Image (cartoon, helix red, strand yellow):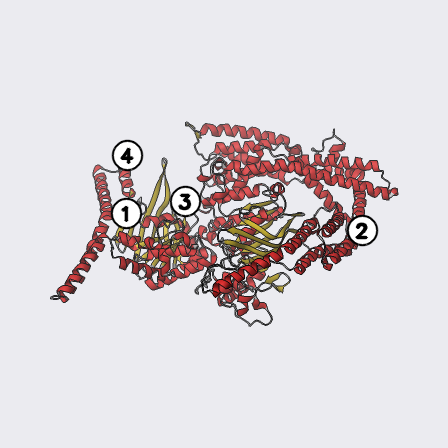
Amino acid sequence: MENNREVLLKVDHLCQYFRLGRKDLKAVDDVSFEIRKGETFGLVGESGCGKTTTGRSIIKLYNITSGNVYFKGQRIGAGTRSYKDAIKQAKKDLKENKITKQEYAAIVEKNRALIKDAKADSKEVDRQYVESLLRSLEEEYAEKFRAAEGDEKQLKALRKEYSNRCRVAQKSRLITQIQMIFQDPIASLDPRMTVRDIIAEGLVINGITDKDYINEKVYEILETVGLVREHADRYPHEFSGGQRQRIGIARAVVMQPEMIIADEPISALDVSIQAQVINLLNDLRERLGLTIMFIAHDLSVVKYFSDRIGVMYFGKMVELADSDELFKNPLHPYTRSLLSAIPLPDPVYEKQRTRIHYNPIAEHDYSTDMPSFREITPGHFVYCNNAEEEKYKQQVK
Amino acid sequence: MNKEIKLSVNDLKISFRTDAGKVQAVRNISFDLYKGETLAIVGESGSGKSVTSKAIMGISAGNSIYEGGEILYDGQDLVRIPEEEMHKLRGDKIAMIFQDPLSALNPIMRIGKQITEAMLLKNKANRKEGRVAFNSLLAELSETMKKALAETPNAGVSVSDVEKYIKTFDDFNIQAIKLENSYNEARTAAEEMIAVIEDLLFLTEKKQKVDVVATLKLIGRRLKEIDDKYFVSKYADTLKAHAAALKKVLRAERKKGNFVKKLVGSRTVKNEASPETVEVLEALEKTAKDMLEQPQYNFFRIGYYVYTHPETDLSQMPAEEANELAGKFLDEDYMLSFIALEKIAVQYSFNKTIQNKKAAIEALESAIAFFKAGDFSAQDADATCKSVNKSVLAAIDPLAVVKDNVAYTFGGALQREVEKYFFYMKNNPKEEARFARQTAQREALLAKGKTVDWQIVPKSVIEPDVQIETIVSVLNRVMNRFKADVESADSFDADKRCVEIIDYLKEKASQVVYTLTKRIAKEKAIKLMEEVGIPEARMRYRQYPFEFSGGMRQRIVIAIALSANPDILICDEPTTALDVTIQAQILELINRLKREHNLSIIFITHDLGVVANMADRIAVMYAGKIVEYGTAEEVFYNPQHPYTWALLSSMPDLDTNEKLDAIPGTPPNMIYPPVGDAFAERNKYAMEIDFEMQPPMYEVSPTHFAATWLLHPNAPKVEIPKIITERIRRMKERGGNHGE
């Protein structure tokens, strides 16, 4: 893996809590990772460990609780809980006379500024994006206008095109650069919309009104994902499972995203169809230069498909490494347990495979030595404390 | 193959009536399921896997038609037995884990009730049924003994003694099992208690806070349940002391935590257990472990001793001594003479059946001759059927515990085939006429230059000769079986049969004695829920299905299926919706149950990794037919059918880097099934003959069959896809080692 590629998405101490009566349910708790341009990042873990929530938080289907999400260097999501907690803590400290009033005022001011920043950023991000788009359009067309000077007819056409593109640009948002493919192809497609409507919906929302252009686009995308033009006027229920998932992929790809979050795109499909969809995603990645975040629980598929893999356990990222490295040197006991549970098509091996059990209470002693997410070897991160870090480093050698 | 066949499916054919036409979901499939093995059925969705399993359960959809074939289980043909009979088997003998957990659960019933429901109902039914089976076999035995004695006058036992022997056996057997049940319950309670204590001690050691009071209460409850006098034996006083100590620490712990009363339920404060508590628990654990290590009593012997000496108590005697004493007494006083008597009866009954079998073979031969001659009237055929069936039924040994499927279902099968013969004799001309009429109509329309948008329905006729051959094959099947039996008559082992009979009687007696109360059922259900990996089972016992996540619901469904201790378990994609760790747990659970209960499992899935783990034998299905059939090793290391290749190469493993070979296209429309090999359309190795004729099953090895023309001696040699050969090579090199 080349490490010098541009970082496309950066997730920084992301927390996503849900209110659950009096307590908070920490679905995602302090997860950080980076995805570089053009790579496939696999996210694995058992059901309910927060994989899907992470994906959904990134595309802002939820308002994140705390932490930051950067896309192409822009902060697209920011939570404020951590700052609020800092103020609360300061208030408590003040009461107990641990800090002076001046210090308290400074902390409050600093965190308030951060909160304001975060709020402003999530509002401003789209405006800035639109502005930059408009600016580039302006530059592009200024030149064209100059070239077409004198020719009234061409100038008129150009003006119309310019105003159209400006309108589209004004409606676009940075977040549409990230698209999601959902797990269940039946539930995620509206049964009362034709395939054309489903695929074109995003374009229409973006302000494109040219019917011919939309049709052209839909046909093109249908062919890209291995369907045919005639399918455009059918309804989702007329398709088989694999074809439905292709429609879901087409819907995501039509927006010309830079990144796709694929949330278990194949777990609801039949074996033979699974291979078709994996091949399709692989094709698209190569052809369109997509960056893919691949969420799944089938480890052999994740291994086959991803460049880097992150392992999640109960809302925490416990291990993150290149896929070969992860399978060769699994360090965290949960990863080992997960790897030992993969069924392979080899009866002799299967009959003697023993699963490693993972019991967090027995494995770790975090009573005094607190764990954090640390780099053991370059590019290989593990959630551990000091003692374990030493142990893992020994192990890798 | 000398393994016992549990279930056999012969030539099964199932179709569905739909608006568009008849969908042929299952087309002539046959397989056997042996005792204690796992048969995996692999294939795409729509290949007829689920239809087959549902047919075995007798829960096919309303529009299904059984077009032929039979499913034989325990001397019955499941396709044709009435619904009431099926009720007795379904869920009890044959259980199923469904694919979709949501539709398999009742949304308005609490989970606990759904799990215990089957247990309680089946327990009641089992007791009744066990009593009937026990009585009828015992009656049969006594009847045979009497007959045998009548023919061998100088056996030393009078006929009136037989009655006494049988009655004694009945009484003391029941008594023994009662003792054993109570002993086992106490033992289980002790085991459970140890598990709870170990958990608590472990958590305390790790300085975790737990609800100590509740746990101590639970331990107290278990301690109370250890009250069987044989199990407690000399530990009675020790246990009493432990109970007192436990009460004391419980009081202390209770004082420590401050309870907050709420409107609903009470909130408990979690504490670390105090050192005194730990001490008491460790001592208790040690005693319980000691008790478990004591040698076990043989209750079959002790039961007889207690039965004859009601006033004596063997519970204070060490187990070995008691066993020896009771065993000696049992042998001298009763068992030896009973077994001798039993052996006479078994031998007598067996000899008689062999004679009957010889007679039956003659009857069968004459029937074959009769049918082969052809041109018979309905009445004659009917009479022949009845007489031959009578002689076959007479040739069944009433003392054989394992029922012979072929002989029991012979009458029905023969009757059906004969009826079919007459049906076709009557209908063939009509069909021919209709076909000719339709063809003429179509041709006339075409001749006029019109477009015809309908197709001619193919004629469904069977030549009388072919049908007669089928009839003869039914007769031959049972005749061959009988001939083999007669030939192997010399090697008959009467002692083995005697043991079998006594084991069977013991089993039935334990069914009769074993009563399940609601309380025990609840405990069992909670244990089962914990076994399938549901945390906080005690709390979740009272929840409704909607409160569970998908994976949890699936586990509930598995718990329900296992609750009735089935004989055959059908798993219809049980782990498809679960993630790897849970999947591994569930598979381990199913495998363990299979070992413990000697279960036979039909496992349906499309995940080949899971198949490799579970299966002893594999059947690959495509478009309603079995295309390859063999042991797991054979199918994975030496696949023969192109469809198996395609399945194997479409799934990545940990070393796959190359592009996957996806299977192009979709499965064929089964309203108009292809004439030739159904997979030909999607098969890059397809030859011309694949489109014209269905390939027969070729034998690769005695246990490995594949239906593909590629195995025909004249077929060209083709290369297996590289991705598979590479993988097989890698697997063989490693010999089961995948790093780690």
Quick one: quadrant of the N terminus of chain B?
A: bottom right
Give the SS element for disc 4: loop
Label 2 to label 4, Cα distance in Å?
102 Å
Q: Amino acid at mark 3?
A: Tyr
Q: Residue at x 83, y 35 (%)?
A: B160
Label 3 to label 1, Cα distance in Å?
29 Å
Direction from residue A117 to residue B250 in the image, left or right: right
**What subunit carries mark 4?**
A
Examine the image and state in which quarter residue B187 appears: top right
Q: Residues within 10 Å of mark 1 (few under 14, many from 20)?
A: many
Labels 3, 4: one chain: yes
Q: Which residue is mark 2?
A: B355
Labels 3, 1: one chain: yes
Q: Are marks 4 and 1 in contact (CB under 8 Å)?
A: no
Q: Nearer the viewer, residue B651 or A27?
A: B651
- Foreground mark, 4 or 1, reads 1
Q: Residues within 10 Å of mark 2 (few under 14, many from 20)?
A: some
Q: Which residue is mark 3?
A: A366
Q: Which residue is mark 4?
A: A96
Q: Residues within 10 Å of mark 4 (few under 14, many from 20)?
A: few
> In the image, is residue B386 above or below residue B621?
above
Direction from residue B210 to residue B364 in the image, left or right: right
